[in-house]
Amino acid sequence: MAEKKVSGPQSYFPSIEAKYGKPISFWLKELAKTKDLKHMEQVEFLKTKHQIGHGHANALVAYFRAGSK
């Protein structure tokens, strides 16, 4: 049986973990600190505080916000 292909923000998770050396749970905890900010403010937080690229930051924020509703 073929594996289901991961799509959406989660498709970035393996490369985020490999590039930045931290599990996704770490990034979600970091985003929890900024839960009252708007989407792009959270993206900017990850980019400036953790030097995460825009695409990776956007994927993390999109996933975080979808699960926070």
Image (cartoon, rainbow, N blue to C red):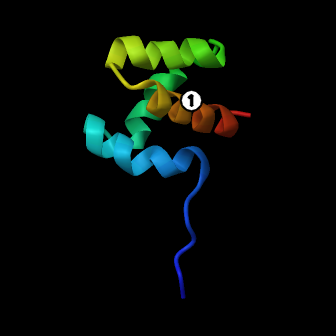
Q: Residue at x 53, y 24 (%)?
A: 32
Q: Quadrant of residue 68?
A: top right
Residue at x 61% of width, y 48% of height: 8
Q: Is residue 20 left or right of residue 64?
A: left
Q: For the view shown, which residue lies furthest in the left direction?
A: 21
**Is 15 drawn above or below residue 45 in the view shown?**
below
Binning the other alpha carbons within 10 Å of mark 1 as few (below 14), some (14 to 19) or many (20 upward) gives many
Q: Residue at x 53, y 49 (%)?
A: 10
Q: Quadrant of residue 34?
A: top right
Eyeballing the image, is 45 above or below 22?
A: above
Quarter of the image containing the C terminus? top right
Q: Which residue is mark 1?
A: 61
Circle count: 1
Does 23 sit above or below residue 11?
Answer: above
**SS at mark 1?**
helix
Residue depicted at 41% across the width and 17% down the height: 47
Q: Residue 33 location, x and y as percent?
A: 50, 18
Residue type at the position of mark 1: Val
The correct choice, above or below, for 37 with respect to 67 in the image is: above
Quadrant of the drawing holding the N terminus: bottom right
Q: Position of residue 58 (x, y in %)?
A: 54, 29
Percent position (x, y) of residue 36? 64, 13
Left/right of residue 2 with respect to residue 56 in the rendered view: right
Residue furthest to the bottom in view is 1
* Residue nearest the observer in this picture, 65 or 5: 5
In this rendering, position of residue 28 left or right of residue 63 = left
Q: Measuring from the top left, give residue 53's x and y in whole percent.
A: 40, 26
